Image (cartoon, rainbow, N blue to C red):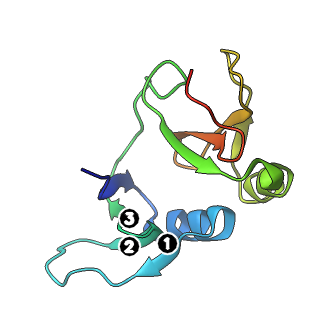
Amino acid sequence: MSFAHLTLATQDVIASSQFFQQTLGWTPISQPGNINRTADWLDIAPGQQLHLLLVEGFEVSNFEAEFGRHFAIFFPGSEFTELKSRLLEQGAELIDPIRDTPFERFFFKDPNGYIFEVIDKEGYSPE
């Protein structure tokens, strides 16, 4: 079994898509023709996608946090400095972890308010 896709609601599909493209390098892919709302599909990794959907009046949950709902991704630790710069330039908020781990990681809040954990792919070892 593997991860197929993650769907995130947003009030601004274009801005959200641009944010993920410009910060994480995720690339647009074609989407099915049966979507009856503004949407964008991004390729995260082979066989893994992010689906962004317009939802009028959308607001994120108050439970977006390290000890709540968040999305964890692997990224090369050697590229953390550049990634953090891109995130800040694109309106993200960097968040320090609450819990120590034997590998490097950090959190960010995207412009929608979703929380993402970025884990050093090169230094990761399960605890």
Viewer-closest of 68 and 90: 68
The numbered mark, 1 or 3, whose residue comes first in the sequence reads: 1
Per the image, label 2 sits on a secondary structure element best described as strand
Vertical relation: 61 (above or below) 67: below
Whether tag 1 and tag 2 are in contact, CB under 8 A, the answer is yes
Q: Is residue 8 left or right of residue 127?
A: left
Residue that badge 2 annotates: 40
Estimate how packed mark 3 is, as few (under 14), some (14 to 19) or many (20 or more) residues with alpha carbons within 10 Å.
Answer: many
Residue that badge 1 annotates: 14
* Residue kind at label 1, given as amino acid type: Ile
Locate residue 50: give its quadrant: bottom left
Q: Residue at x 67, y 69 (%)?
A: 22
Q: Residue at x 65, y 47 (%)?
A: 121
Does residue 96 appear anywhere in the picture?
A: yes
Estimate how packed mark 2 is, as few (under 14), some (14 to 19) or many (20 or more) residues with alpha carbons within 10 Å.
Answer: some
Residue 69 % position (x, y)? 42, 29
- Label tally: 3
